[in-house]
Amino acid sequence: MKALLTFCTVCMLAFVAGAQAAAARSVEPNYEKVKNSRWRCRSCPFELGQGSRFDLSATALQTDDVDARFGRDNGLTDDDSTFDASATYFRRDAETGRVIGLIGRDLGLDSGRLDLSLVRPNRFRASVSWSEIPRNEWLNARTAMTGKTNLRFPTNWTSAPNTQGMTQLVPGSRPTKIGTERRKAEATLAYRFGGNWTVEAGYARETKEGRALSSGDFLYQTTGLLTPIDHTTETLSAALQYTSGRWSAGLHMRESEFENANRSLTWQNPYTEGTGPGEGRKALAPDNEASEWGLTLRVSPFPGSVLRAHGRWGELRQNDQFLPPSVNPAVAATPMPLPPGLDGTVDTSAANLQWVIPLGRHVALRLTSLDRERDNNTRSLPLTPVLGDGFPSLALQSRHYSYKRDRTAAAATFRLSSKTRLEIGVAEDERRRTLLEVESNTEDQQWAMLRVRLPRALRLSLRHQENDRDASGFRNITSNNPLTRRYFMAAREQTSWKASLSAPLGPAIHAGFSVDRRHSDYPASVLGVQSETDDNWSTDLTWQIAKHIHLSAHRSKHRVRSRTAGSSTAGNADWQGGTEDVVRTSTAELSINEFWRRASLSVTFDHSDGSGRYDTEFNSLLSVFPELVSKHRAMDLRLSVPFGEGYLASLRYYTERYDSADWQLDGVAVNTLPAMITFGLLSPNYDARLVAITITRKL
């Protein structure tokens, strides 16, 4: 608290200095600098007259030496030539104001999107969209298994007690792509009637297909598995809104259904028969449903005051039929018959309230309240675990987790002068949960923030915050060491601050600098996280070299450190662990516009280095893991030249080099670990290039 008071004192001194400097000079308005191109006409039914536009572009692309990381979200994962197309159509009717719009992007790629909209101002709005969203994870995953939901090894497979004895494992493994492809279709219709009422309805359908990495085990023997993904989600929504004068209110409802085409995944046991069952099975994500309805309210009780309230109430339901506890015929039937399904029900609620109250001309008070609750009403069931698909254990009662969060805050903003703002705030954040060692936490927060516009166009921003979180008594209801405190519910003392400064260095040069730090201590944690520190700084520079030539540069460093205490004997701490992650980033961009034949040219350089260091200290002996390393280098060159009547030719040359090293992946082949068949993944290392030539026609 002393640090907070000291910070407020510094803020007041800065305000006095800024006010004196402002009073020492006079300001004369320059109306020639006023830009009115974006002013709105409040009396017009719609702002613009009749107009239309049609743009069509065709692109030829060539990619080389690409990787899953390079094409993670754009679908460019093959060394090949491809064709892409984009289109934009826009038309406005001068009499009715009706607008028709069609936008298509990347229609030749796996990341394409198409949007169609029809709007009549103050009457109706209709839209339809289609999008494809790829997510490529790996191109070099290796597996010897075939099948989708029933994974099998080749007919000449040689079982063995460990991977070194599986003679067909290495020659039989083949590279496989890992990732997903989402396809989403949406349609919405909104209609306004009576001048104040608006009704809206919508429908969305999303499919997600692909494969993900997972694993299955028979006690201590593990096999990497490819899990099939074939999901469908459908959502219906409806909303009603009323707007009048100083207030508006709305009601919305949403119903969603999730379906998984695959209920389970079965796989062949690759290890020696007789040491376990011949196959294993695990359940996949079950079908489920969700319902939600909500209310929104916005009202201005008196001039300058705004009250906003949002409330949402939902229900989650899941009642898929239970699978048998094991596919192993040697396992006896469970002593207790399983119910038909889980009959699971979870009630959720969320409420937000914000009220801004002016207290005179120079002070505004902001009050906020947040409430979140998840109440799991699923009944407790007696279930019999089967270990390694071979050994049933004693029946256990299923347990269901619920939580509740309440946060209240108050902040006052003081307008100390026309160029100075000071904000001081306090908050209390309370969290309660079931079935965990710590039942509740209460965190007190205080902060102060100062924003000042100083002479010579300097802008200064300072922020300081202190958080103090306590924890309820430890409940010994889990198998964790009683001295362990998990970081998200342990007592914590946290301090953070941030400072930023921006200023012109001349008539054409502008610079900015920002630095922030957050430090957390866990004083009551004998075992677990002891401390965390997050440091970050960045600097930016822009330079207008000439009227049509601009240069910008950025440099930043982000470092995260932590210390953890552990025990090898389930007693007091006898070892310490530390982590340090650092990312350094530099970028530079040069752009030249309106040169030869109104052409434009830009070139961007990206340079980023990342590292991760992990160490442990046991019995005064320091052990350091191999450092995790990533290096990213990229250059993006773009040239656009208009020609003919409404034509534009564009050239893009992009090169990206990425080098990385991860000791958890590199050198670990499919048969390196005796009791685990891995995917033989390799750290991403590539030198990719992209060449694109685009012709755009504007009509």
Image (cartoon, rainbow, N blue to C red):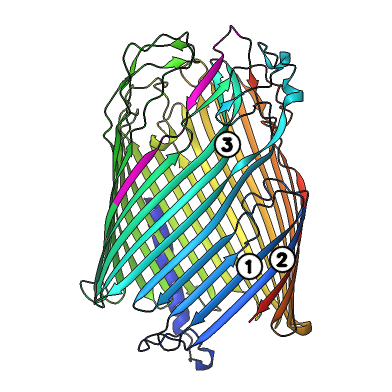
Q: Which residue is mark 3?
A: 212
State which tag comes first along the sequence, 1 or 3: 1
Name the image quarter holding residue 307: bottom left
Q: Which residue is mark 2?
A: 59
Q: CA distance from mark 2 to mark 1?
A: 8 Å
Residue 276 on the magenta segment: yes
- Left or right: residue 223 versus residue 594 is left
Name the image quarter holding residue 641: bottom right
- x, y percent for residue 416: 37, 73
- Left or right: residue 9 versus residue 382 is right
State which tag comes first along the sequence, 2 or 1: 2
Among all residues in the image, which is located at the extreme top? 274
Assess whether mark 3 and mark 1 are in contact (beta carbons under 8 angstroms). no
Range of magenta residues: 273-292
Q: Determine the residue positioned at 34% across, 17% down.
A: 396
Does residue 134 appear anywhere in the picture? yes
